Amino acid sequence: MSCSASPAWAALAAHYQDDMAQFNLAQAFASNPQRLAQHSQQAPHVYADLSKNFCTTQTESLLQALAHDCGWQARRDAMLAGEPINTTEGRAAMHWLLRMPRDGGQLRQHPVVQAWPQAQWDTLAAAHDTLNAMLALAEQVRADRQITDIVNIGIGGSHLGPEVVVQGLEDWVDAGKRVHFVSNVDGHELGHVLRQVRPESTLFLIASKSFTTAETMLNAHSAREWFLRQGGCVQPSAAVSIAQHFVALTTNVAAAQAFGITRCLEFSDWVGGRFSLWSAIGLPIAIAIGQEQFRDLLAGAHAMDAHFFNAPIGHNLPLRLALLDIWYRNFCHLGSRCIAPYSHGLRRLAAYLQQLEMESNGKRVTHAGQCLTTPTAPIVWGEPGTNGQHAFFQLLHQGQDVVPVEFIVARGGGKYLGAHQHSLVINAIAQAQALMLGRHGVSAHQDCPGNRPSSFLLLQQFNPASVGALIALYEHRVFSAGAIWGINSFDQWGVELGKQLAQQLRQREEQGDWQGVDASTRDLMAQLGPAVA
Ligand SMILES: O=P(O)(O)OC[C@H]1O[C@H](O)[C@H](O)[C@@H](O)[C@@H]1O
């Protein structure tokens, strides 16, 4: 049964029409002194104030009934059991295992974990062996005074997670290494980094789950060529050799070795690319902040995992957020969500979430291959505050579209506190208030309609553990929404088509065969093809 055929779906549609279409946030606060308590929740490291959303306790109850009707709990347990819930690729999705202590940690009493076969415990032990090897390498690199620059070459999941965490935890970066990220196939990005580094003091990390991604392979080959042109050697015995200065982070060790890399950190195919920052893909993070802090990052994420796998439907924060996402998308017909981290460190959070949410849940068929008749992932977008206020917040306040805004704010931490931190958080609070209250009776141009929804995610403190918990919260939220929609959040077949067509265009170009190709594509190839490059 698809989610929209469930009785709860019909009840939610009726609830929207009958009770919520004219809902007013300010009035809801005025008439219900319990509103904040009813729609807020403390989870590990993260407090969520959801009270400025278009919902009542009845909305939340009906949404919880939807989760129940759609088998959310069984899907959550299947993930924890290590079942192949990524059905189109026949794989489990076990990123959470990478942050679980060897003895199961806070989940060891969970009935599903108690029922694990020995093989699952062996998988956990193997994940710890890999983690220890990764952290040992990170410490070795941190202690190596000759290495001043780390260049991570990878794209998508092999880039965005590590980048958001390294930037976010800038105040914990203590080994004096500069960490650069190169993702785009546009040579300007690689060129810009290579102009700043020297081969003898640079460690290249070639991060690719598949070790076949075209952009990463081209960037890796160009980096290798540059390295050799600058006097680097292929002989492993030489000090400035590829063996010493290139490390691969991948599931495809054979391909990395064929490329000429001998130092490989491997991870398993049950780690989805966009869920992989906890695996070997996290090496740039571990080099930047050190093993102790990396373990804190994992511990924060594990605390959120324990909350997610243990908490019941009504008190499960990742699920509550997922249900609000479904409510807005499917019943209130709001197509996007704005991500507003009031944190310079989290300036790339929206980019990270764009992959996490839109690549996971931007889907239109169920596990069984049935076409869904309802929209799925919202479009997520955003910029850090306060910058966004001076750009697109105008539309949020006075535009014709209602966009739920998600404020992410930390309760201190970091080096530069005082007046700056205070101003940052006051701005976030004031924006949420302005969105809700609006301004009335001044003039047509100055009035703001108000009644615009927002959520507040508040980190107890800004540190590795809370960043880990925040990211795990988002991961489980995305999984929960996908589980209710009945889609596979762990594949990404839509991405393949463009890759295939790029390959076909290359072949056509070589063969000079443009038969059957549309006039626009042909003309663009003529204008931008190799003659121009
Ligand atoms: O890590 P890689 O195998 O190089 O993949 C990098 C990225 O490229 C792909 O096209 C996928 O859409 C992403 O999910 C993935 O994270």
Image (cartoon, grey):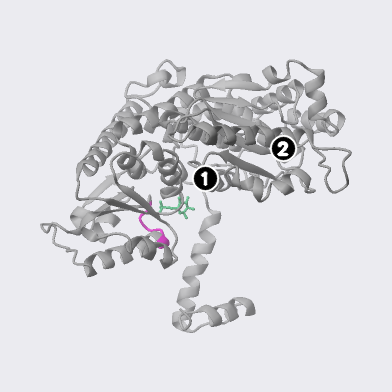
What separation in Å lies between label 1 and label 2 (alpha carbons)? Answer: 25 Å
Residue 58 position within the rendered picture, expressed as x and y whole percent measured from the top left: 76, 22
Mark 2 lies on a secondary structure that is helix
Q: Which residue is mark 1?
A: 347
Residue type beneath disc 1: Arg
At which x and y percent is residue 305?
47, 26
Task: Determine whether the residue tagged by mark 1 lies in a helix, strand or loop.
Answer: loop
Q: Which residue is mark 2?
A: 328
Quadrant housing the C terminus: bottom left
User: In this view of the protein, can residue 433 be seen by the observer?
Assistant: yes
Question: What type is the residue that disc 2 sits on?
Answer: Tyr
In the rendered image, the quadrant that contains the N terminus is top right
Query: What residue is drawn where x is 27% and y is 64%?
Result: 224
Tell me if the residue at label 2 has its CB under 8 Å from ligand 1: no
Q: Quadrant of residue 234?
A: bottom left
Callout 1 touching callout 2 (CB < 8 Å): no
The image position of residue 11, as x and y in percent, is 79, 28
Q: Nearer the viewer, residue 443 or 249?
A: 443
Q: Is residue 445 magenta?
A: no
Task: Provide the major secondary structure of the magenta segment.
Answer: loop
